[in-house]
Amino acid sequence: MTRVPLLDIQNLKVDFATRDGTVHAIENVSFQLARGETLGLVGESGSGKSVSAYAVMRLLGASARVSADRMVSGGMDLLTASDAEVAGMRGKHMTMIFQNARSALNPIRSIGEQIADVLRTHRAMPRREARKAAVEALAEVRIPDPERRYHAYPFELSGGMCQRVMIALAFASEPELLIADEPTTGLDVTTQAVIMDLIRLKSSQRRMSTILITHDLTLAAEYCDRFAVMHAGHIVEQGSTADIFDNAAHPYTGLLMKATPHGASSLSDLAAIPGSLPDLRLDLPPCRFVSRCPQSTPACAAALPRVALDANHEVACHMPWKESA
Ligand SMILES: Nc1ncnc2c1ncn2[C@@H]1O[C@H](COP(=O)(O)OP(=O)(O)OP(=O)(O)O)[C@@H](O)[C@H]1O
């Protein structure tokens, strides 16, 4: 029996209409996420990780044109569902931890009340119980003195504290799908581990599925079951953590991994990968990596293939990476 994935995206495409032309931000993005699975979404800045996430959450603005062959989450067809239906799913079935936590919090409500509100709305907790659980939720993400901090407003907290509150808020609704966009940026290493361990715990206890968007490959390797590597709006390779880190098949993945051999864990710390992302407003070739690729041949001008290397390992390349190249 095949298991129905929690999230199923086929050929997602996102264009933005701008004054300077159409930005072809995402093209042919396809991936599935099983229940309880953690997928790492990695790639250089501007590769389309956040746009993919926002498309799933239906949070892209009016300038975005979104299309797909399929986009289903938790049984809901995100292509045909009304805004009200998707809004009903957000925060309950699927929730997102944003990069800029402070601006995602309500500035005029105390952090404890914000968490208690979620517990009362989504988990129907009585007021007193929600208050107690909110204090516990703050403690769980290592907010010191949570009883007192319950009454604090976001402006009274540091960026790192706001980040933790945001994470507590995300967990409060017990989502089936968590999209975490750089969830631990700005946190010290110990707190990073606490947060990531919490995500792992929720995944195993409640089979929560997670998309982890990150520049931190070392962290991601420790916590993700599978990876999708993005370059210039395409998923160039996806596979298990071992496939990606030990058997990278796309030249771009190979360069990413080669550039992080000795603890340079962040993509921003990497030895530069030659060239830069193409201008997404231009007419783009089928392979958007071709101008940077050390292995390109005339064959690369043909339509981009999706080569299945095994059941879970797929690469969009005519010339899959060879270690000797
Ligand atoms: N509202 C928008 N209008 C026009 N272009 C946009 C818009 N939002 C994103 N883009 C473009 O889409 C592309 C993908 O951006 P995205 O934010 O998804 O990258 P990312 O991989 O998440 O980068 P980072 O790691 O820096 O967050 C970029 O070229 C970006 O400039």
Image (cartoon, rainbow, N blue to C red):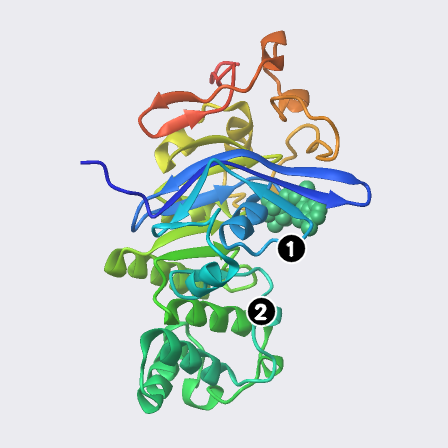
In the image, the residue with mark 1 has its CB under 8 Å from the nearest atom of ligand 1:
yes
Label at residue 200:
none
Q: Which residue is mark 2?
A: 104
Q: Secondary structure at mark 2?
A: helix
22 sits left or right of 236 in the view = right
**Looking at the rendering, in which quadrant would you find the N terminus?**
top left
Looking at the rendered structure, the kind of residue marked 2 is: Ala
Q: Residue at x 50, y 81 (%)?
A: 111
Label at residue 61:
1
- Where does the image place residue 76, in percent across and percent down from the top left? 38, 51
Query: Please, is residue 178 above or below residue 221 in the view?
Result: below
50 sits left or right of 18 in the view = left
* Label 1, residues with CA under 10 Å away: few <14, some 14-19, many ≥20: few
- Where does the image place residue 281, in percent across and percent down from the top left? 74, 35
Q: Quick one: 288 or 262, which is closer to the camera? A: 288
Q: Quick one: 193 or 238, which is closer to the camera? A: 238
- Where does the image place residue 105, in percent across and percent down from the top left? 56, 74
- Where does the image place residue 6, in percent across and percent down from the top left? 33, 48
Query: Can I make out residue 310 in this image?
Result: yes
Q: Quick one: 150 or 261, which is closer to the camera? A: 150
Q: Earlier in the sequence, mark 1 or mark 2?
A: 1
Query: Can I make out residue 261 in this image?
Result: no
Q: Secondary structure at mark 1?
A: loop
Q: Residue at x 37, y 78 (%)?
A: 119
Pointer 1 with pointer 2, Cβ within 8 A:
no
Which residue, as the protein is rendered here, is positioned at the far top? 298
